[in-house]
Image (cartoon, rainbow, N blue to C red):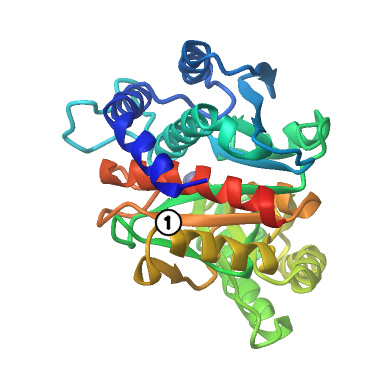
Amino acid sequence: MDLLVIKNIVSNINSELIKVRRQIHANPELSFQEVDTSKLIKFYLDLWGVEYSSGWAEHGVVGLIKGTAYENSKVIALRADMDALPIQEENDLEFKSKNAGIMHACGHDIHTTCLLGAIYALHQTKDQWGGTIKFIFQPGEEQLPGGASILIQEGVLKNPEVDAILGLHVQPDMAVGQIGICEGSSMGSSEEIFIELTSSGGHAAMPHLTGDTVLTAARLICGIQELWSRIKPPLVPSVVSFGKIQTEGGATNVIPGKISIEGTFRCLDPEFREKFCEALIPFIDSTVLPFGVKAETKVVRGYPVLYNNVNLAKIWSELSIQYTDNESVVSIPPRLTAEDFARYAEVVPACFFRLGTGPSANVHSPKFIVDEAAIPLGSGILAWSAIGFLKNV
Ligand SMILES: [Zn+2]
Ligand SMILES: [Zn+2]
């Protein structure tokens, strides 16, 4: 099949896709509450005559497109996430978020739009390729346990069995026109750490009569960094950071009876991930004990390392160079942000690539913006690589 056909289709539908994107951006919905986003997706699928089933992890939409040009039993899945974040948008856009305190600050409005564009192109050309494309609009990427694990339990990778899965994410530090991939371990595992320190609390001038929660918290935060740095193999990419510390009560002369500390642990190595998680609680308990402070620690296990299948990544790069050119397809380093696309990658060969959306504040910032000019490439490359995967995987 001629790739110019795909390019023309996504270019012809571009103004409609921009409307879709703005509608989603203006009406963002939090994880697992994607009611209107789901309705909008279904509206377009109905309009185009594309069959689907809904109710996946509540608001997810999943369907199949069958290429009829020749017999091919392969099934390739395309996934987009749909949810927004609890952030108050600070951009001055005519389609700025209308929902107070909620914003598409991670580009999932673009992901959903690009998948719709790809579905349109695949549906229009289904007599020109062979095989099955399964599309997955996934709720709740930004909130544990993540929509992917629920969809997998609900059987999204089965019936028909998926041979490989492809997804994309916007990338603000890459120019529009660029697409990038990191082969192998490409995004971090993520754990959330919650520590609660308690003592009787008391007079700051008589610390010997209580447990000093403040000093113990300080000691713990430094100590955990030391533990991490000493048990981590030096070449393993990983980070532990604490982003919140809160006392209940306390004053210049009062030692508070309660302090909570919250942080995150990221890592690219599954072995060190387990080692650190196992070492953490005994370390905390033994550190606080001599200070007369009690610790309650919860480590909430998050997404695993996202592994980009090396063979698939190579095929994707070749297909992307065909679609664009040598310079537009870049190899990017791994990062320690996390993605629940990693859940699919645990089950089937997966390929997760980056779509350059131009300069902006980082994702998850109230000033995050994207250049909509990236939409045709996002849609086209999803469709073109899906067709290519059907032939090569
Ligand atoms: Zn995000
Ligand atoms: Zn995201």
Residue 271 as seen in the image, left or right of residue 125: right
Circle 1: residue type: Tyr
Is residue 302 in view from this perspective?
Answer: no
Q: Nearer the viewer, residue 342 or 323?
A: 323
Q: In this view, does 236 lie above or below 168?
A: below
Residue lying at the far bottom of the rendered structure: 234
Query: At numbered mark 1, what does the secondary structure look like: helix, strand or loop?
Result: helix
Q: In this view, does 278 lie above or below 101?
A: below
Is residue 328 in view from this perspective?
Answer: yes
The picture quadrant where one finds residue 23 is top left
**Picture coordinates of residue 281, whole percent (x, y):** 78, 62
Residue 324 as seen in the image, left or right of residue 313: left
The picture quadrant where one finds residue 142 is top right
Q: At x 73% / y 32%, what residue is drawn?
A: 151
Quadrant in the picture for the C terminus: bottom right
**Picture coordinates of residue 48, whole percent (x, y):** 48, 16
Q: Is residue 230 above or below residue 108?
A: below
Residue 374 as seen in the image, left or right of residue 142: left
**Picture coordinates of residue 335, whole percent (x, y):** 52, 67
Q: Mark 1 points at which residue?
A: 323
**Picture coordinates of residue 390, whole percent (x, y):** 67, 48
Q: Which of 232 and 186 is in front in this view?
A: 186
Q: At x 77% / y 70%, what residue is drawn?
A: 283
Q: Which of 250 and 342 is in front in this view?
A: 342
Q: At x 34% / y 21%, what residue is drawn?
A: 99
Q: At x 61% / y 76%, what residue is drawn?
A: 237
Q: Which of 153 and 328 is in front in this view?
A: 328
